[in-house]
Image: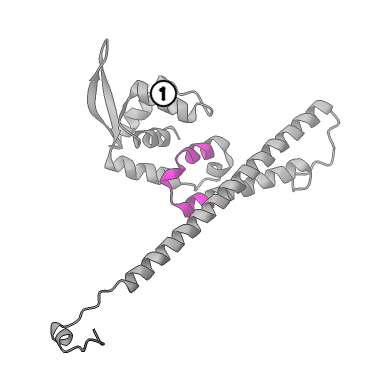
Amino acid sequence: MLELAILGALKEKPMYGYELKKRLSYLLGHLWKISYGSLYPALKRLESKNAVERAYTVKAKTRNRYVYRITAEGEDTFQRLLVDTRKSSEITDADKFSIRLAFFQYMEPEMRLWLLERRKNYLEEKLDEMSGTGKGRDKDKDTDSYRQGLYRHRQDLLRSDITWLEDMIEQERMQIQEGKKEKETSKADEKGGEKLIIDEGSIKNMTPLQA
């Protein structure tokens, strides 16, 4: 997932190591801590795949810094990684889903909608299980007040996430509908915008009323 995040960040602009680490920390710092120990090996892997390249160097106080940029092959790799959801963990794992969410702008609206709906369905199933109404219902109720409070807190977090996803799903649906309307309008304009060609001789023979 780090390679996906690096390519997504480099789509914004070329960056050197420190700048890239800072940008990734801003985008994904709430998910995990980005270290140079993981960043540079990932950059080398991407370089070996021709997904990124060293564009130029920047003069620093003590040494030159390489500025990395994404390549055309890297653009293809990024898109492939972004929509690769063959593993169920890409939906169920909160961190993996959040990384994709950070780069939602690069997805087609239909793909975004599909991912949001799948994530919402998963959270709803999880909430049903925790509420004691789903398949994972535990017959032996926990009587510990602290654990009960923790369960309620987790349920509240799930409900909050579900509500947030519902809002995003509604926005995506509206965007898809607007896109369809724009396409229909564009097609109608093309059909109605055909030029009327009139022969010059026909114009000369027209009466004032016909003209």
Q: Residue 54 sits in which quadrant?
A: top left
| Local secondary structure at mark 1 | helix
Between 121 and 93, the one lying in front of the other is 121
Between 46 and 203, the one lying in front of the other is 203
> Residue at horizontal 41%, vertical 27%?
23
- Image spot of residue 44 (x, y percent): 32, 28
Magenta residues (range): 96-114
| Most frequent secondary structure within the magenta stretch | helix
Q: Residue lying farthest top?
A: 62
Q: Residue 50 sits in which quadrant?
A: top left
- Image spot of residue 32 (x, y percent): 51, 26
Q: Is residue 71 visible?
A: yes
Quarter occupied by the C terminus: bottom left
Is 109 located above or below residue 206 in the figure? above
Between 6 and 168, the one lying in front of the other is 168
What amino acid type is highlighted by mark number 1? Lys
Q: Which residue is mark 1?
A: 22
- Image spot of residue 189 (x, y percent): 35, 68
User: Relative to 171, is 151 on the left or the right?
Assistant: right
User: Relative to 130, is 22 on the left or the right?
Assistant: left
Q: Residue lying farthest front?
A: 208
> Residue at horizontal 40%, vertical 24%?
21
- Image spot of residue 147 (x, y percent): 79, 29
State yes or no: residue 5 in magenta: no
> Residue at horizontal 32%, vertical 40%?
74
